Amino acid sequence: MKTIYLADDDEDDRMLIRDAIERVISDVHVIEVSDGEKLVQLITSRKNFDDPVLILMDMNMPRMNGLETIPLLKADVRAQHIPVLMMSTTSTDALVTRAYEAGINAYIVKPVTELEYTHLAQSIDVCFLHAYHGMTEPIAKPNLRDTSIVVIEDDLDNMVFVRSAIQQTMPEVEVIELGLEEQVLHFFRHELPTMQQKPHLVLLDLYFPTRNKGIELLTNIREALISQRLLAIPLIVFSYSDDPKDIQESYINKANGYMIKGSSKSKWESEFQNLHNFWWNTVWFPEKNDKQG
């Protein structure tokens, strides 16, 4: 059973989100609370954290709002591994920035239509519960010129799959390939600060070449992004491993998301289409808000 915690003081919003999740996601249990204080009490009192859980949390709640709740969750060893999606009806640059600085994984403007609620549930299932839904149609078609994805992968065969999948789903996107630890550290510490057009996403192979080295590299990259205030670049770990310990360790070390590598060409392409739909078209970052005015 997959458990999702839903924290929102608006009963109607909770109902719409829960209905969409239960309609789209199989074998799921939604636990509802109305404020951040109750959420923290509920989560930190649980003894078993083996389930692949997720927190969906409203920004504005009574007693303890989202920004006040996040630090308490991230400071508790029983909750550090749980990814947090923050929702709000507002999306000002300052608010979104504060949310990412507090430690959320993604910021989402609350859905309005039934189709948007369904898309949110599908995105959660694919991007955080690792379900396979096949190729989905893009929900938007942004201009991808002058955009790039950094792919950190030391397996040449896997890099071929990645390159092909990006070419099929995002043909205008440049792929920046990094296959050595020295290359990665030099890029993020010296090349990235001088780039006029920053990458739109970073993909890091967890086993680069070992799990421990991959986690160490994840920490170094996150520190570099924070020091340069590049909160608008999502850092996604990807791996063939579906071991809950690997997924949890990645979230503890501040990955925005975790992606399981496809086992076939079609699945690779599907994963990248869904990756594009969620991290480019659904999630909000400070830079996106600037473009929206």
Image (cartoon, grey):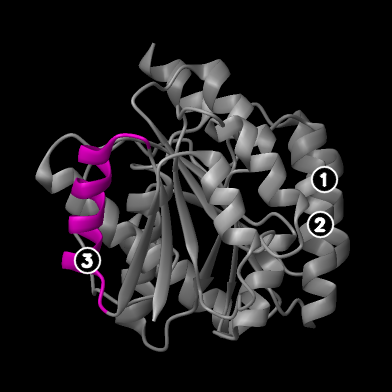
Q: Is residue 261 above or below residue 110?
A: below
Q: Earlier in the sequence, mark 2 or mark 3?
A: 3
The residue labelled by disc 3 is 22
Is residue 195 rendered to the left or right of residue 220? left
Earlier in the chain: of badge 3 and badge 1, it is 3
Q: Check if residue 242 falls in the magenta segment.
A: no
Residue at x 73% of width, y 29% of height = 229
Give the alpha-carbon distance from disc 3 to disc 1, as whole Å: 37 Å
Query: Which residue occupies the extreme left position in the image?
Result: 114
Amino acid type, label 2: Thr
Q: Secondary structure at mark 3?
A: helix
For the point 53% across and 27% down, the residue is 96
Vertical arrangement, residue 143 with respect to residue 32, above or below: above
Quarter-of-image position of residue 225: top right
Residue at 43% across / 81% down in the picture?
262
**CB under 8 Å between discs 3 and 1:** no
Point out residue 39 in the picture as x, y percentages from the top left corner: 53, 49
As drawn, the label of residue 91 is: none
- Residue 223 is marked as 1
Dot in front, 3 or 1: 3
Question: Which quadrant holds the N terminus?
Answer: bottom left
Q: Position of residue 146 (x, y in %)?
A: 48, 35
Q: Looking at the picture, how far across and down is residue 203, in whole percent?
A: 60, 60
Q: Is residue 20 magenta?
A: yes
Identify residue type, mark 3.
Answer: Glu
Residue denoted by label 2? 219
* Circle 3 Cα neighbour tier, 10 Å, few/some/many (<14 / 14–19 / ≥20): some
Residue 20: x, y in percent? 19, 57
**The magenta segment:** 9-26
The residue sitting at 25% across, 39% down in the picture is 11
Quadrant of the snapshot with the C terminus: top left
Which residue occupies the foreground of this view, 231 or 143?
231
